[in-house]
Amino acid sequence: MKEIYARLLEMMNAGEKGVLATIIEVSGSAPRHPGSKMVVRADGRIFGTIGGGKLEADAIATALSAMEAGRPVQETYNLTEAEGVLCGGQAVILFEPFGQEEQLIIFGGGHIGQALAPLAAKTGFQVTVVDNRPEYATRERFPDARAVVAGEYPEVFDSLPFGPRTYIVVVTHAHEHDGEILSYCIARPFAYLGVIGSKHKAAAMMERPEMKTAPAESRSRVHTPIGLKIGAETPFEISVSIMAEIIEVRRGISVDALSMRLSS
């Protein structure tokens, strides 16, 4: 059991996703007892066992589905000959995904990005900061970030953790970079996508050819101008307004930010 928890901790510290599968109940004959555990990694490899054979193969498939959904699942397995298992009993298994932390990618390591990163970290986000200027993308400037990436934006896109729990803030030092990043991110899965700029700039970016071909649902979820309207002026105030808007989306309050902003 200690080995299972040690592997869990190792994977979580490395930011690796996985699922902890635990037998919570058995009736009749079963290959393992309640409390038996198995860790399933994202590639299907396992550590530990809940009994082997068809039960374990089916459990791995369920674990991968639970990982994709990002929520716990409880499943009952009949260990009968009709199901391809000869034990004759029944097992109830709980699948608990881990390593599903919400990610915040901040494109732009300037004043706003530097003020936003610690706020996001304190709010429970795993923060990645990206800037194409090496002097801005440093650990000294972003001690709270999980990762700090220096490089031209198109060259680092594929290394970033895009997913349904990814929040994206675009606050670079140049409009052309903001548009380039938005055009890429709109085609990726995300929970939030915000781009700094005026209403005029927002409207111009949405006229880019790649934006016009993006799904309407994705376009409607772009937040630009970014942040709640609280009269923010300083980098810290702007970062507070951005974080407040992100929390609003996280809690399921705001759903059609772009249309509201461009029509107001």
Image (tube, rainbow, N blue to C red):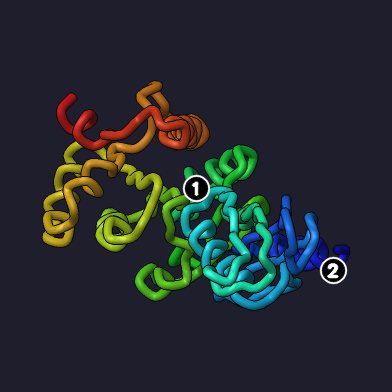
Q: Is residue 41 visible?
A: no
What residue did someone put label 2 on? Answer: 3
Q: Residue at x 17, y 47 (%)?
A: 216
Residue 264: where, in percent of width, then height? 18, 24
Q: How far apart are marks 2 and 1 (CA)?
A: 40 Å
**As drawn, 257 above or below 47:** above
> Image quadrant for the N terminus?
bottom right
Mark 2, residues whose alpha carbon is within 10 Å: few (<14), some, or many (≥20)?
few
Q: What element carries label 2?
A: helix
Q: Which mark is residue 99?
A: none
Q: Position of residue 98 (x, y in %)?
A: 63, 55
Residue at image position (43%, 66%) is 132
Q: Nearer the viewer, residue 11 or 69?
A: 69
For badge 1, the amino acid type reads: Gly
**Mark 2 and 1 residues: CB-CB less than 8 Å, in contact?**
no
Helix, strand or loop status at disc 1: helix
Please name which of the two marks, 2 or 1, marks the residue nearer to the observer.
2
Question: Quick check: can you spot residue 50?
Answer: yes
Which quadrant holds residue 257? top left
- First in sequence, mark 2 or 1: give its number: 2
Residue 122: x percent and y percent?
A: 64, 39
Q: Is residue 75 left or right of residue 235?
A: right
x and y percentages locating residue 56 in the rendered image: 63, 71
Quickly name the residue at label 1: 113
Q: Residue at x 61, y 72 (%)?
A: 85
Query: Mark 2 belongs to which amino acid?
Result: Glu
